[in-house]
């Protein structure tokens, strides 16, 4: 396994006055065996960043190192990485075993060694009983596991995952997420995992890179990113429902945006006077959508609280120790 270093990495598409810069100088040091998730909305540059690490996109500026070796000029095959995509791209006419073994056969790894590696990967991924099947005889989740197995048997220095769970249904996504966590524990792999799904990011990452419009907004553990978002963008992107961001909160500071998460607002007899717009029941919890002047405020309560009626006025108190403050002009945490 290996560490990964990104030094002021830049990506431009096109040349001259038609050039479009989509990555604006990303810096990150990823430790050996770390599981890093790159998360952000569609078009923010996550895939481009991953593909530059893989060598599938040229780097316009800066430097990428894998295991202390600058890889800028190296072909993908020379970088010692394995990539798992959203589309598993298995060979339909080959068995599961042959799909996993194919890359090793090409590299002329001895057949005994191939068998050992495929059997080991199949055991970890619980594919042992499916090795003779063809891809069409597998479920979507099983196919994605074969695609991961194909990456594992190569024993690369780094695993790159590009939205590998997006084609699976909700239940399978959760299950496969658990399998990937297990895989990381058992193999101690260095991994870069791209997703637009903040729940996936929060549950999988040891540390996460939150991207916005080609820039890294924050790099930290899920707890840091959730509890101390660096910008209003991160505050509203991570967490569902998002953090309330109030420009004109009573008791607010001039020139600052107040942030408060929906679970840190208590309905009671004191605090802000809010009008209830709608109430969403989500099983164990309840989301109360309110209005305070121009700001919308979401309050999260549990099932033990009676649901307030639409159009009623309620009192909501923010927990003082859970307030966040952001500069109104830059959006940066104060
Ligand atoms: P994400 O993976 O976060 O959805 P991408 O990395 O795919 O985002 O894209 C980042 C930006 O780069 C987008 O604005 C996209 O339109 C642009 N882009 C991606 N590929 C190309 C390309 N081959 N030529 C020009 N622009 C591209």
Image (tube, rainbow, N blue to C red):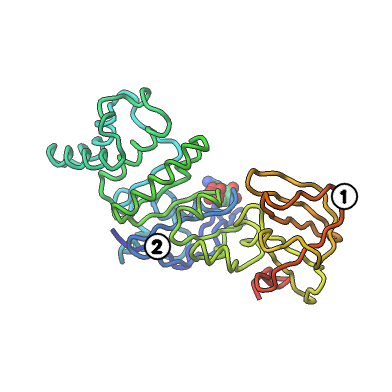
Q: Quadrant of the N terminus?
A: bottom left
Query: Residue placed at 20% from the left, 42% from the top?
Result: 117
Residue 71 as seen in the image, left or right of residue 246: left
Residue 314 image-quadrant placement: bottom right
Q: Position of residue 144 (x, y in %)?
A: 39, 36
Query: Residue placed at 75% from the left, 50% from the top?
Result: 306
Residue 139 image-quadrant placement: top left
Residue 106 as seen in the image, left or right of residue 93: left
Residue 70 as seen in the image, left or right of residue 319: left
Task: Please give the residue where the numbered disc 2 appears in the rendered image.
Answer: 64
In the rendered view, tell whether residue 330 sits above or below residue 115. Answer: below
Residue labelled 2 has its Cβ within 8 Å of some atom of ligand 1: no
The numbered dot on residue 311 is: 1
Residue 33 as seen in the image, left or right of residue 327: left
The numbered dot on residue 31 is: none
Q: Of the residues tagged 2 and 1, which is closer to the observer?
A: 1
Front-most of residues 208 and 160 = 208
Kind of element beneath mark 2: strand
How far apart marks 2 and 1 lie (CA) works out to 55 Å
Query: Residue placed at 36% from the left, 65% from the top?
Result: 31
In the rendered view, tell whether residue 164 sits above or below residue 232. Answer: above
Q: Position of residue 270 (x, y in %)?
A: 81, 67
Q: Position of residue 305 (x, y in %)?
A: 72, 53
Kind of element beneath mark 1: loop
Front-most of residues 293 and 309 = 309
Query: Residue placed at 61% from the left, 53% from the top?
Result: 18
User: Mark 2–mark 1 contact, CB under 8 Å?
Assistant: no
């Amino acid at each position: 396994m290996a560490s990964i270093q990104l030094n002021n990495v830049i990506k431009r598409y096109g040349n001259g006055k038609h050039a479009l810069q989509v990555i604006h100088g990303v810096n990150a040091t990823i430790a050996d065996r770390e599981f890093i998730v790159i998360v952000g909305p569609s078009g923010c540059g996550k895939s481009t960043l991953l593909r530059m690490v893989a060598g599938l996109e040229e780097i316009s500026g800066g430097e990428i190192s894998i295991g202390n070796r600058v890889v800028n000029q190296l072909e993908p095959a020379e970088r010692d990485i394995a990539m798992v995509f959203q589309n598993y791209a298995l060979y339909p006419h080959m068995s599961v075993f042959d799909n996993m073994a194919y890359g090793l056969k090409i590299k002329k790894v001895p057949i005994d060694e191939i068998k050992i590696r495929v059997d080991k990967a199949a055991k970890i991924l619980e594919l042992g009983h499916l090795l003779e099947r063809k891809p069409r005889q597998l479920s979507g989740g099983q196919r994605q596991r074969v695609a991961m197995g194909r990456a594992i048997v190569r024993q690369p220095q780094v695993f790159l995952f590009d939205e590998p769970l997006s084609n699976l249904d909700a239940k399978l996504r959760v299950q496969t997420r658990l399998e990937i966590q297990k895989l990381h524990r058992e193999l101690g792999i260095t991994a870069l995992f791209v997703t637009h799904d903040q729940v996936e990011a929060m549950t999988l990452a040891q540390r996460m890179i939150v991207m916005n419009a080609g820039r890294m907004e924050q790099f930290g553990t899920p707890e840091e990113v959730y509890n101390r978002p660096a910008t209003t963008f991160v505050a509203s992107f991570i967490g569902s429902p998002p953090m309330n961001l109030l420009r004109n909160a009573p008791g607010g500071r001039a020139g600052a945006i107040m942030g408060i998460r929906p679970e840190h607002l208590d309905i009671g007899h004191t605090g802000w006077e809010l009008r209830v717009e709608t109430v969403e029941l989500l099983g164990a919890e309840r989301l109360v959508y309110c209005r305070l002047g121009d700001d919308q405020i979401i309050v999260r309560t549990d099932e033990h609280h009676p649901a307030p009626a639409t159009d009623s006025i309620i009192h909501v108190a923010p927990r003082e120790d859970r307030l966040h403050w952001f500069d109104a002009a830059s959006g940066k945490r104060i």
